[in-house]
Amino acid sequence: METDRREIYRYLGYGIHPVDEETRRLVETCMEELEQAETHRAVMREFPLNITEDGLIDGGCFRARSRNLLKNLSGCDRVLVMAVTLGASVDRLLLRYGKLSVARAVVMQAAASAMVEAWCNEVCTEWKQEYEARGLYLRPRFSPGYGDFSLSCQEQILNGLEAGKRLGITLTEGGLMMPTKSVTAVIGVSAHRELCPVEGCEACTKSDCLYRR
């Protein structure tokens, strides 16, 4: 798993600004520690997709009303539901540096966020290749909390994947995942290759955002 350093610098708010050498060195030492601590794992299940006339999305292990997700899943008849994590040891590392060094804790948080996204990208690329070999095509992953896809679906997805038993992911009373560097998402499966709309930074008009790619 290769973590794009540009994503780490983006999370740190550098944007188009040059990164000083001290920060580069700090990023590399943080990455070394994270790579030793992380135990990345992933789980995925495929479910039939049913959408009612009034827009209720039934993804097998979750139900949701979301115009954004509905648009993403247009033309799909099945969904992949996924969860990934870097493991509890990364959380312990973040907690330790939160007490010892503010600067290192900030960089460690950014590096771990970029690392879990890199892991998501890697497994999704593998699944994409597997499905295309069968003549099926995957849509971009869509996570609870993005757009109007409610975070309340997080619990349904984790339960449907048995993520507590299989990955050690649990939810706090406030609905946050533990370990914190974990991601859940829904991926549409279609028999037709379609160009999906550009999302995220590329679609956002806020050009002065510190975290823009």
Image (cartoon, rainbow, N blue to C red):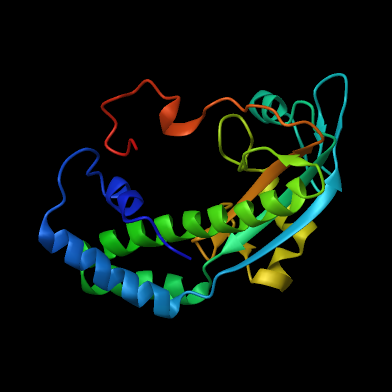
Q: Is residue 36 above or below residue 102?
A: below
- Viewed as shown, does residue 113 lie left or right of 61? left
For the question of whether residue 156 can be seen, the reply is: no
Which residue is more in the foreground, 164 or 3? 3
| Quarter of the image where one finds residue 143 | top right
Q: Position of residue 163 (x, y in %)?
A: 70, 64
Judged left or right of residue 185, residue 39 is left
The image shows residue 123 at horizontal and vertical percentages of 61, 58
Residue name at image x 27 percent, y 50 percent: 9
Toward the viewer: 83 or 118?
118
Tell me the quadrant of the picture where the C terminus can be found: top left
Q: Is residue 78 left or right of residue 132?
A: right
When asked about the image quadrant of residue 41, the answer is: bottom right
**Is any part of residue 148 visible from this angle?**
yes
Q: Residue 49, percent across and down?
A: 85, 38
Image point (63%, 64%), residue name: 170
Across and down, in percent, residue 168 comes to: 64, 71
Compared with 164, 12 (above or below) is: above
**Residue at point 73% right, 58% down?**
44
Give the quarter of the image for residue 37.
bottom left
